[in-house]
Image: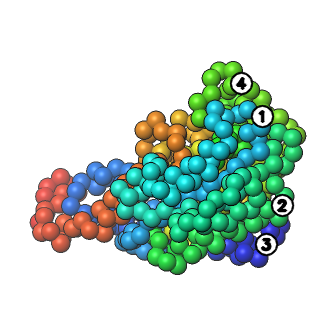
Amino acid sequence: MAISELIDRTIKEIVPLDEAAMASAKARQDQLTKPQGSLGRLEDLSVRLAGIFGEATPRIRRKTVILAAGDHGVVAEGVSAYPQDVTPAMVMNFMGGGAAINVLAKHAGAEIVVLDAGVAADLPSHPSLRSVKIGRGTNNIAVGPAMTREQAIQCLETGIETCREQIAAGSDLLACGDMGIGNTTPSSAITSVITGAGADATTGRGTGLDDTGLAHKISVVQRAIDINRPDPKDGLDVLMKVGGFEIGVLAGVFLGAAAGHRPVVVDGFISGAAALIAYTIAPKAGHRFIASHQSVEPGHRIALSCMGLDPLLDLGMRLGEGTGATLAMHVIEAAAKCLSDMATFAEAGVSEKTEDGQEAAS
């Protein structure tokens, strides 16, 4: 079913990975000055990058973290250990350079684009902040739909447009980060609906709930699913009924990156829920998703498994903001550089192993 001109066109632009580029990358990997397969997953990742870019030796020149912020009406149900006013406070912290994502992005040499997708407060203008506010926080999903269909479409289009802009400006590697008090609750609901896993399996402690708080949160997630009855095969319907503005914008970023033949890094649980929505709308987009790390949030593993993604890192993280994705950028860039910058046996004049076990001079 048609969604909108921009979204429909973006979906059509999402094509399978370039098999010829992958074959060339694999052939080069097998000739590099190392035993075949000795770089493990770095080799597989480099070949996949070739398929994503459609280039035998892809290069990453510019990295960008797209960080979307939004609030959630479901915080009225007491699902978070932190109050809602932490969301705008943290956005201002991003602007001041004091958050973990600021430190890690700088370390990775990545730029940050911060989007106010739906913070329930008026934020002061700042050169590093873009106001794309779809609303002042979503509606309470425990009593009805999070947003209208029109707002859900606006979320996706905003993410696609932002991603296209960054690719046009030279970004070769994108990552999706989030900020929004209460956003693990809609993420749990999204993950349950799309994967079919129970709310008790997809719901975690978020900002640090105790056992009683966790049990209550699980009941709220289940209530949201029962009341809204989203269609698990319709990503837009899931977003509209149990999603979030920042989640929808990031889903658009995932679609835009896939259409633009660029790798896009999945961060933690919220980023993973956004990826699930994009994956449900356009399953082929998932070939261009790279899972950065394994979040402590239990639903994250379920979401990644549904998309066939294997995370690169497992550091016990659960912060969000794009922090895990930014750390993984080092590994992704290393994979690309090993493919493009290492010498082959012939180039280095090094002997390689022959089929009978003897060495042959190259």
Residue ID at (74%, 62%): 134
Q: Amino acid at mark 1?
A: Glu
Do the numbered discs 3 and 2 sit on residues whose CB atoms are within 8 Å? no
Do the numbered discs 4 and 1 sit on residues whose CB atoms are within 8 Å? no
Disc 4 or 1, which lies upstream in sequence?
1
Camera-side residue: 358 or 300?
A: 300
Residue that mark 1 sits on = 77
Camera-side residue: 348 or 359?
A: 348
Residue ID at (69%, 21%): 212
Q: Where is the N terminus found, in terms of image quarters?
A: bottom right
Residue ID at (75%, 66%): 154
Tell me the mark number nearer the camera, choosing from 4 and 1. Answer: 1
Estimate the spatial distance between the alpha carbons at disc 3 and disc 2, rounded to whole Å. 11 Å
Relative to 94, say whether 346 is above or below.
below
Q: Position of residue 226 (x, y in %)?
A: 86, 38
Do the numbered discs 3 and 1 sit on residues whose CB atoms are within 8 Å? no
Residue that mark 2 sits on = 149
Res. 303 image quadrant:
top right
Report the residue that reaches farthest toward the front. 124
Q: Position of residue 268 (x, y in %)?
A: 55, 46
Residue that mark 3 sits on = 4
